[in-house]
Image (cartoon, helix red, strand yellow):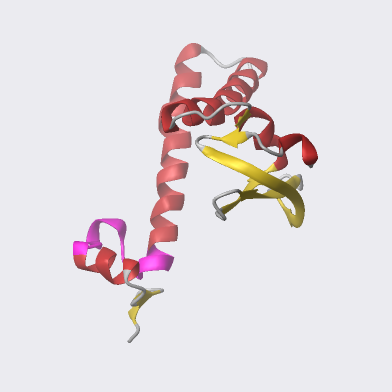
């Protein structure tokens, strides 16, 4: 994917981009981005279209580029569903938020072995030092 060579994602300059076998939830292609600083990230190919730029950008600009197409697609789905303004707000602010919060809580339970509200600063320190794996202290 040579069209991305020497461009940027945020402040990171791209060395190369390669499609990988892994797919998104909708069975769309994913790509591994190799940066000139030797860091790597994986993105859905579709996401690259909105976040790759010719110039460096800061984290705020990158965030805006990342969420803009998502917001646009959500609004199209809401409009196509003929929801009232009240139902559209309920769908996004309540149902989508609850779904995200629930997913985070379940992932935290798998990672930490406890509920989000039970995670301590010591737990965080153990994870950062590589001692806590799936809720168990490993020495």
The one of 135 and 60 positioned closer to us in this rendering: 60
Name the residue located 46 percent from the left edge and 51 percent from the top edge.
Answer: 103
Whether 139 is drawn above or below 128: the answer is: below
The one of 69 and 73 positioned closer to us in this rendering: 69
| Residue 70, image quadrant | top right
Residue 129 in picture, x, y percent from top left: 32, 71
The one of 60 and 74 positioned closer to us in this rendering: 60
Name the residue located 35 percent from the left edge and 70 percent from the top edge.
Answer: 113
Q: Which residues are magenta?
A: 109-121
Residue 28 in picture, x, y percent from top left: 76, 44
Is 118 within the magenta? yes
Name the residue located 72 percent from the left edge and 41 percent from the top edge.
Answer: 45
Q: Is residue 137 left or right of residue 1?
A: left
Whether 118 is drawn above or below 66: the answer is: below
Q: Is residue 66 left or right of residue 134?
A: right
| Residue 2, image quadrant | top right
Is 16 within the magenta? no
Residue 35 in picture, x, y percent from top left: 60, 48
The quadrant in which the C terminus is found is bottom left
Q: Is residue 59 left or right of residue 129?
A: right
Residue 22 in picture, x, y percent from top left: 72, 57
Name the residue located 66 percent from the left edge and 46 percent from the top edge.
Answer: 15
The one of 123 and 41 positioned closer to us in this rendering: 41
**Which residue is the extreme one toward the left?**
121
């Amino acid at each position: 994917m040579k069209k991305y060579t020497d461009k940027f994602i945020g402040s990171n300059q791209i060395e190369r981009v390669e499609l990988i076998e892994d797919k998104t939830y909708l069975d769309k292609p994913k790509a591994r981005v190799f940066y000139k600083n030797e860091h790597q990230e994986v993105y859905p190919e579709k996401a690259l279209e909105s976040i790759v730029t010719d110039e460096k950008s800061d984290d705020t600009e990158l965030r805006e580029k990342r969420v803009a197409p998502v917001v646009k697609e959500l609004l199209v789905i809401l409009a196509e569903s003929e929801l009232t303004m009240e139902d559209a707000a309920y769908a996004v602010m309540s149902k989508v938020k609850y779904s995200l919060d629930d997913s985070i809580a379940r992932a935290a339970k798998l990672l930490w072995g406890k509920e989000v509200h039970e995670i301590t600063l010591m737990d965080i320190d153990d994870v950062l030092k590589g001692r806590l794996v799936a809720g168990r202290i490993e020495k």
